[in-house]
Amino acid sequence: MQKTLFKITKMDCPSEENLIRMKLDSVSSIKSLDFDIPNRELTVFYIEQSPEQNELQRIEKAIFALNLGAQTIHTEHTKQDSFRQNQSQNTAQRKLLWIVLGINFSFFTIEILTGLISQSMGLVADSLDMLADAFVYGISLMAVGKSLLRKQKIAKVAGYFQIALACIGFVEVLRRFFSEETLPDFQTMIIVSLLALFANGICLYLMQKSKSKDEIHIKASLIFTSNDVIINTGVIAAGVLVYCFSSALPDLIIGTIVFVLVVQGAIRILKLSK
């Protein structure tokens, strides 16, 4: 049995973990994956099936394709040949995925509606970011027990749909930029983004709790360094700037930035379909 340690600098939250799990699902030689999100590390346990087949190269190719800033740290032989995996654990993980999926999709609905009503592109863009996370968790659930081809089709539909929504958002940003300025409701931007920030915190906490890690400070540091939290904070800051300068420009800028991040996330999802 071999084990290889990877450093994955852009693995900020459980959604990236799910992407990696799905990408490596087709590598039959892998026996276990050990994720350490706070330290952005992944340990892969696998069997070298034959001298002619380099399993490490297959694993590296799959991980590197996601463009998450992964690098191989070291590989060593291990005598460990048993890993905890039982039906109750699978049921618990599935239940947890449904919870975080529900939270993300609920806040997608809240943010898209309040964003349209308040004329805030920042909230609309943030809602698509929440939808992106919901897609990842949803793909994980839908793909359970399915064939590799079915998983690839699910990922492809989700990725293209997400890109389409982001493109619509870009067009709307341009339309608002060149048309008569309409100030978004900064109070709605700030309040809803604070609630989304709280929701993201709950999701990350629950996902970390599932790994039986009791270090609260690690969970907290994970929450505040995640991309979702940065985006929520950016929308809040944009709301404050809209109020201070009586300009819609900060809202359009943060909206554009988040739409770019949404497209990047969609591209990662599409990589699962290859």
Image (cartoon, rainbow, N blue to C red):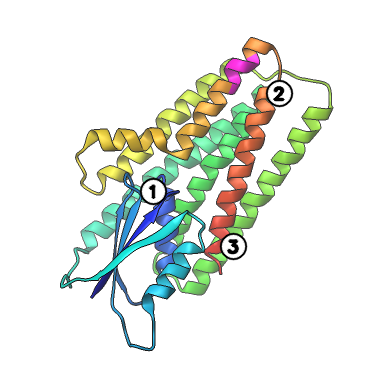
Residue 16 appears at what percent x and percent y?
43, 52
* Element type at mark 3: helix
Image mark count = 3
Residue pointed to by mark 2: 249
Q: Which residue is mark 1?
A: 14
Side of 60 where 163 appears, left or right: right
Q: Amino acid at mark 3?
A: Lys
Identify the element where label 2 is drawn: helix
Q: Residue at (23%, 75%) from the top-left corner?
A: 1
Looking at this view, is 230 or 104 the one in front? Answer: 230
Report if the CB atoms under discs 1 and 2 are less than 8 Å apart: no
Q: Residue at x 67, y 20 (%)?
A: 184
The stretch of residues the image draws in magenta is: 238-242
Instruction: Give the dominant element type of the magenta stretch: helix, strand or loop.
Output: helix
Q: Quadrant of the C terminus?
A: bottom right
In terms of sequence position, does the residue under pointer 3 or pointer 2 come before the other?
3
* Circle nearer the N terminus (1, 2): 1
| Residue highlighted by disc 3 | 156
Query: What x and y, as percent, mark residue 177?
Result: 78, 28
Q: Residue at x 78, y 35 (%)?
A: 174
Front of the two marks 3 and 2: 2
Q: Quadrant of residue 126?
A: top right
Give x and y (percent) for residue 248: 71, 21
Based on the picture, tell me whether residue 237 belongs to the magenta stretch. Answer: no
User: Which of labels 1 and 2 is toward the front?
Assistant: 2
- Crowd rating for badge 1 (residues with CA inside 10 Å; few <14, some 14–19, many 20+): many
Answer yes or no: is residue 26 visible: no
